[in-house]
Image: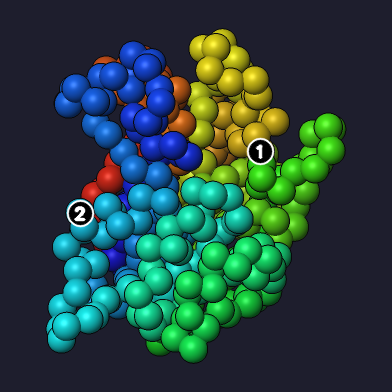
Amino acid sequence: MEIIVLGAAAGGGFPQWNSNASACNRARSGDPAAPARTQASVAVSRDGERWFLLNASPDLRQQINETPALYPRQGLRHSPIAGVVLTGGDVDVIAGLLTLRERQALTVHATQRIHDVLDANSIFEVLARDVVTRSVEALDASFVLEEGLTARFFAVPGKVPLYLESGSEPPPMVVDDTTVGLEIVEDGRRMIFIPGCAAMTPDLSGRLDGADIVFFDGTLWRDDEMLEAGIGQKTGRRMGHMSLSGPEGTIEAFKPIRVGRKVIVHMNNSNPVLLADSVERAEAEAAGWIIGHDGLAFTI
């Protein structure tokens, strides 16, 4: 199985377009210790010929242009992108679908809840239904991406996307088809992709155990990071994300879990782990984590 990280940042990317923070300015200046990152997405292939995108970032056109494996290869119109697999309905997960509107045959795999989100917004009809197949996948049921490459959605703790919240009260954290993780299997080798997760649970820990590679939510280093920086009014928990540090954080939660390789993706522009010279980066790497970046590739 071949895997390419197309983007590793959270919504807004790094640098974020309207951020005047030091880290974003370092990225704009070309600081090698603060390389820019587009919004989180991963591409997976069994043979390097047909590729499946895990989420469709708003930066998808740029990501395709920067990834030769995704270039057209034959005739006047062609793409090796055979499908898109969606793990949620947030803007940074689905907006890139609009980039794929030029009547290119592919399949969009998602839960019924996420297909309902797409169906409710007519702008997604630019993905012509006579060309683009919308495949509804049930939780915990294996589905075939192509021969030899299977996938499975499973629920992880999360909440509805911000634009679907209603009322003045924070939405409840739920474990259902609102936020899902994705397992992809080829010849017994397992990769797991979870770009958004609100908490570690015994069920999730058991599912992660023994995976060859895991791509996991790294939105914030500290739960109150955005509050302390004066750039937001919400904690990580309120946004539906675990933080990397702390006794209930991702780094601590993964210590008893046996995983071949652990890769952090979906990092907010405020997260100091983005900076190669930060103490937080050193701490994460000392704990065995790989800090995701655009173009990072693996073969398992």
Q: Report the residue at 55% width, 34% height from top.
A: 250
Image position, residue 218 (x, y; %): 48, 36
Q: Nearer the viewer, residue 21 or 186?
A: 21
Q: How crowded is mark 1: few (under 14 residues within 10 Å), some or many (20 or more)?
A: many
- On screen, residue 174 above or below 126: above
Left or right of 10: which side holds 242?
A: right
Q: Which of 268 and 129 is in front in this view?
A: 129
Q: Which of 140 and 104 is in front in this view?
A: 104
Instruction: Classify the position of the C terminus by image quarter.
Output: bottom left
Q: Cβ–Cβ below 8 Å for labels 2 and 1? A: no
Image position, residue 125 (x, y; %): 54, 73
Instruction: Name the amino acid, label 2.
Output: Glu
Image position, residue 260 (x, y; %): 40, 51
In terms of secondary structure, where does tag 2 sit?
loop
Count of marks placed on residues:
2
Label 2 or label 1, whichever lies nearer to me, is 2
Q: Report the residue at 71% width, 48% height from top.
A: 164
In terms of secondary structure, where does tag 1 sit?
loop
Q: In which quarter of the image is residue 247?
A: top right
Q: Which of 79 and 224 is in front in this view?
A: 79
Residue 228 in sight here: yes
Which numbered marker is on residue 130? none
- On screen, residue 294 above or below 82: above
Image position, residue 58 (x, y; %): 42, 51
Specify the color scheme. Answer: rainbow
Q: Report the residue at 79% width, 34% height from top.
A: 170
Gap in Å between the C-alphas at discs 2 and 1?
30 Å
Q: Quadrant of residue 118?
A: bottom right
User: Which residue is disc 2 drawn over?
Assistant: 66
User: Which residue is disc 1 drawn over?
Assistant: 240
Of the numbered discs 2 and 1, the one sitting upstream in the chain is 2
Q: Report the residue at 16% width, 63% height from top.
A: 68
